[in-house]
Image: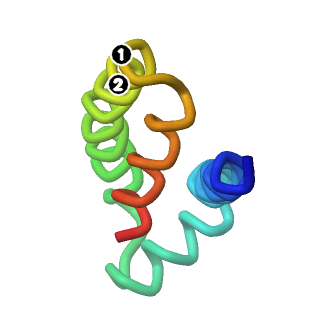
Amino acid sequence: MQRLMIAGAGTKLALSIANNTTVLCMLYGCMMGAYDGLYLPMMVLGYACSVPSFILSVRTSQKKGQKASLTKYVSVALA
């Protein structure tokens, strides 16, 4: 139960950071220097990378259960 709670908390934290526009703006501004033309390509790239991981996590949770899926993919994301 503790692992499931930690995995859920990690997932919620990562989702709130990823969806926060201020964090994205500051991150890209610090890393890239110019933020003008990079927002859309980086967001499309992020969504393109997240779709396969979402599909894999759904299939894993269908076969092995939610707990196994959450702990596996949260540990992969943290690594």
| Lateral position of residue 45 relative to residue 29, left or right | left
The figure's colour scheme reads rainbow
Q: Decide: few, some or many residues near mark 2? Use Cα within 10 Å; few <14, some 14-19, many ≥20.
A: some
Residue 35: x and y, percent? 42, 69
Position above or below: 12 against 37:
above
**Residue 69 occupies which quadrant of the picture?**
top left
Which residue is at 33% across, 59% downward?
Answer: 38
Residue placed farthest to the front in the image? 1
Residue identifier under label 2: 60
Helix, strand or loop at mark 1: helix
Residue 72: x and y, percent? 40, 47
**What label sits on residue 63 in the rendered view?**
1
Q: Amino acid at mark 1?
A: Lys
| Lateral position of residue 14 relative to residue 56, left or right | right
Instruction: Say which of 21 and 58 sits in front.
Output: 58
| Lateral position of residue 7 relative to residue 68, left or right | right
Q: CA distance from mark 2 to mark 1?
A: 5 Å
**What label sits on residue 54 in the rendered view?**
none
Residue placed farthest to the top in the image? 62
Instruction: Say which of 71 and 51 sits in front.
Output: 71
Q: Amino acid at mark 2?
A: Thr
Helix, strand or loop at mark 2: helix
Position above or below: 8 against 17:
above
Residue 51: x and y, percent? 32, 28
Which residue is at 49% across, 23% downward?
Answer: 65
Look at the image and tell me in which quarter the C terminus lies: bottom left
Position above or below: 58 against 36:
above
Cβ atoms under marks 2 and 1 closer than 8 Å:
yes
Q: Decide: few, some or many residues near mark 1? Use Cα within 10 Å; few <14, some 14-19, many ≥20.
A: few
Position above or below: 20 against 66:
below
